Each structure stands twice: as C-alpha cells, then as structure tokens.
Image (cartoon, rainbow, N blue to C red):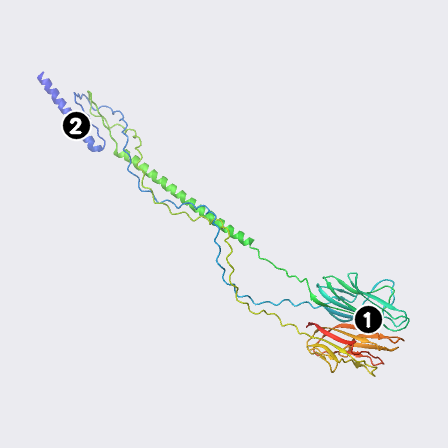
Amino acid sequence: MAQTKLLVAVLVLLGTLMIQTLAEEEKEDEGSCSKQFNNNQNITVVAAPGPVGPKGDMGHRGHGGSPGEKGVRGAPGKLGPVGPRGEKGDKGEQGPAGEKGAPGTSPPAPPVVAFSVARTTSLEKSSSPTVVTYDVVLSNVGGAYNQQTGTFVAAVGGVFFFMFTGMTPNVANTNYYIHLMKNAEKMVRLYEGNGGQAHYQSSSNSAILQLQPGDEVWVELHSGHSLYSDSGRYLTFSGFLIHATGLSQNTVEPVQTVLTLATRGTDTFLLLKHMKMAQTGLLVAVLVLLGTLMIQTLAEEEKEDEGSCSKQFYNNQNITVVAAPGPVGPKGDMGHRGHGGTPGEKGVSGAPGKLGPVGPRGEKGYKGEQGPAGEKGAPGTRPPAPPAVAFSVGRTTSLEKPSSHTVVTYDVVLSNVGGAYSQETGKFVPTVGGVYFFTFTGKTPNLANTSYYIRLMKNGAKMVSLHEHNGGQSQFQSSSNSAVLQLQPGDEVWVELDGHGRSLFSNGNIYLTFSGFLIHAV
C-alpha cells in the first residue's frame, strides 16, 4: 500500500510538471493567446493526447477607439445667393461743368426755285376755259415749270411769288379775262377791254401763295375771251420761291438690345460655371470624409483581431485529463464592434464661397444740381451771308418820240443796294451771278392815237415787252411786265423804248419805274 501511494504521488507530480511545461511552451509560441489549465484537485492522465478542444467562447467587447485625427480642410462653400436690392441712392453731387460746345454747323442752303416764260402767239376765243401755255422759257431754275402743260408744280413747300400779264387784240370790242389758278381754284384775276375802238390794252397782276409739294399753279383764259401776243412777248408768267418751309430731316437712334442680351448671356454662363465648380468641390469633400471613416473602421477591426484575443479555459471543478492536451481550437468569433471613438477636432473652415451676383440696382437718387455752364463753343462754320442786291428807280419826265431805240434812264433812285444799277447809263450790271427778278412799267401820253412799246433787254436781246395804245381817245393807258432772269457777273439789263414814234409819259408822280433784286446767288 505504501508503495502504491508513493507511485501515484510520483505520477501526479510528473503530470503537473508536464502540464505546466506544455502551457509555458504554448504561451511562448502564441504570445497573446493564453491557454491555462488550472486544477486544484486530482488530475489523472491515462492515455495519449485527446481530441481537439471545443470552440472558445466569444471575446469580450473591445475598448472604445482613440479620438479620430483632425478633419481635413473643408471644400469652398457654394456660390452665395443674389444680394438684396440696394437702397435708394443719395442725391447726386452737382455735375461738373459742361464741355466746351462744338462749333456750330451751317444750315442747309435753301432750295432755289424760279421761272419766267413768255408767249409769242395769240390765243383766240375758245369755247371752254383754256390753260395758257408759253413757248419761250426765259428761265426755269429748279425745273418746276412744265412747258408742255403750262403748269407750275411745286417740288418743295414754301411761300411763292407769282406775276402774269394779259393784252387785248387790236380789234374793237374785244377783251380778255384770265385767272391765276391753284389746284383748280381761282386765286386772282385780270380783266381788260378796249371798248369800241381797235387798240391794244394790257395789264398785269400778282399774288403770293403758300404751296405744299405737288400743288399746281397756272394761268387760265376764260371761255369766249382772247389774248394777243407776237414776237414782242407781251404775255408772260413768272414766279419764284420766297421762303421754303416744311423741310424735314430723318434721324436714326442706335439700339443696344443685342449688346444687352449678349452681356446678360455671358453673366449667366459664368454663374453656371461657378455653380458647377462648387458642386465638384463638395463631392470631393464627401469622398475624402467617407474614405477617412472607412480607414478608421478597418484599423479598429484589425486592432480588435490582434490585440484583444483572449482564449482562456477556466475549470473550477474536477478535470480528468485522459491524454495529452489536444491541438489549439479554432479562432473564436469576432467580438462586438467597440464603441465609436470620440469625434476628432472640427476641421478648419473651408474657404468662403465665391461672391454671389450683384443685387438689383437701387432706386435712382435725386438729381444733382446742374453744373455750371460750359465754355462758349467756337464760332460756327456758317457760310457768309449772301450778298444783297436790289434796286428801284423812277422817272419824273416824259420821253417823246425818239428817232431810234432808246435806253430809258431814271432820274430818281429809290434804292440801289449793292450799287449794281448805273444812273448814268440806265443799265443794271451785276457783280454777283445768280437768279434775279425784274419788273418795269409804261404809260401813254394823254393824247389820241399815241402808244408806247418798251422791252426788257439782256445783253442786247429782247426778253419780254410791254405795249399800250389809247386809240382815238385822249386818255392815259399804263401797264407793267416782269421777268426772272439768270445772270452772270458783267451781264447788262435795261429797259428800251422802241424808236418808231413811240412815247412814254411821266411827271413828279413817278409813273415810270424799273426795279430788280437778287433772288439767289449762284
């Protein structure tokens, strides 16, 4: 019995020493895996090592992770919203002095319209009103007179002067009745009758009419009446523009609509571009944050796998080891995820987003005080004023039957602006070329069977004539005629009395006159 107990004690001692040795070697091989066999009671080792041990229990929950690293710098903020509408501006300051005015510009030259025509044949009694046509064109500046129709058609609106003459045939009991017409309406009339005697009777009339472009003016002979003329050109019709009216200018204003739309389109494109940039930056920031969280999670899981593995076998009851320790059991299930670490420090604020678009324009401020007047502009480039040429002369004595054609001279000078009329020669000699109007008068002596025949001459050529005869009665007969002539410097114009026994009467009342003036210098 004593030997048996001694043998058992030796075996127990050897088993204990073997278990401790194996436990220490296992601990050295695996490091963090602690496999301990504790037996405070009897252990009997009978055979070779036993089968693989059961799966270890689940490990304890890991400790909370350490605080995360400081967050990365945030992406720039989104484009700011449109700013609020600006407040009404303050009253503007007084404006600066205006710039020096630009030199003045000259107005456009007024149009020139003037004509004078004459007829060299008679016009016998007609059964209906007849437009008087004229076969000799002395002048037609502006081309408004139509020789085929005998009508003046205004091309420009304005104020016009017209004058016309008439003469009876040298037949007893004949007369004429003519009208100055405007668009088929009678303006003024002229009537002359020679009574029961065969002699010429002539006269003239005139009117100033305001016309619109397209208005028509003509001389019309009343039905049943006659007019006389021959190469002497007793029948005349003249007119000229005094003042043009109704001239208009077309202005054109630049439109900025296309430019404004183009500018707005550019602003819209830039705004969309900024929005796209902000969205891209935000996406990058989100991806970085997700990546950081994923890395931290993986690190914590790895740490749990390697650092917190605890495989312990506790047995506080009898354990009978029949064989040597079995191989290491399989790895236990992963423990529950540790508590989240404390949040890292707040990252640095991202750069401010780009400035939002400018808010709508505030209300217009009060108008500032008017600035001082600018300096006076340079004198305009106005053309020099046209020369003034005009004269009017009269005769106070009669001119009895000269033996030859005689220039009528005038002893009274009523006016002679420009000095173109020579009182010594009785001739008008212009120093300025242009369009001129002339008018002259005649009167018979108070003697039966007397007459006068005078002509308006230009450089020796007959322009228009004036003839009057008082028949067998002792009476005065007077009349006038006129013409519009285009002259060059140095041309000569005068009144001439026919030398075949003709006479002119005048006295201190100045019945005989000769006048003229420049209509337009050219």
Along the line of sight, which residue is nearer the eye, 36 or 273? 273
Along the line of sight, which residue is nearer the eye, 6 or 446? 446
- Residue under label 2: 20
Tag 2–tag 1 contact (CB < 8 Å)? no
Image position, residue 350 (x, y; %): 37, 46
Q: Amino acid at mark 2?
A: Gln
Could one spot residue 322 in this view of the protein?
no
- Indicate which label's residue lies in the foreground, 2 or 1: 1
Image position, residue 254 (x, y; %): 57, 57
Could one spot residue 465 in this view of the protein?
yes
Q: Is residue 29 left or right of residue 129?
A: left
Based on the displayed image, in which of its 4 quarters is residue 462 positioned? bottom right
Residue positioned most to the left: 2
Of the two numbered discs 2 and 1 on the same chain, state the one appearing first in sequence.
Answer: 2
Is 71 located above or below residue 489 in the figure? Answer: above
Name the image quarter holding the C terminus. bottom right
Tell me the CA gap for discs 2 and 1: 167 Å
Which structural element holds mark 1? strand
- Residue under label 1: 203
Pointer 2: residues within 10 angstroms few (<14), some, or many (20+)?
some
Along the line of sight, which residue is nearer the eye, 74 or 246? 246
Pointer 1: residues within 10 angstroms few (<14), some, or many (20+)?
many
Along the line of sight, which residue is nearer the eye, 282 or 97? 97
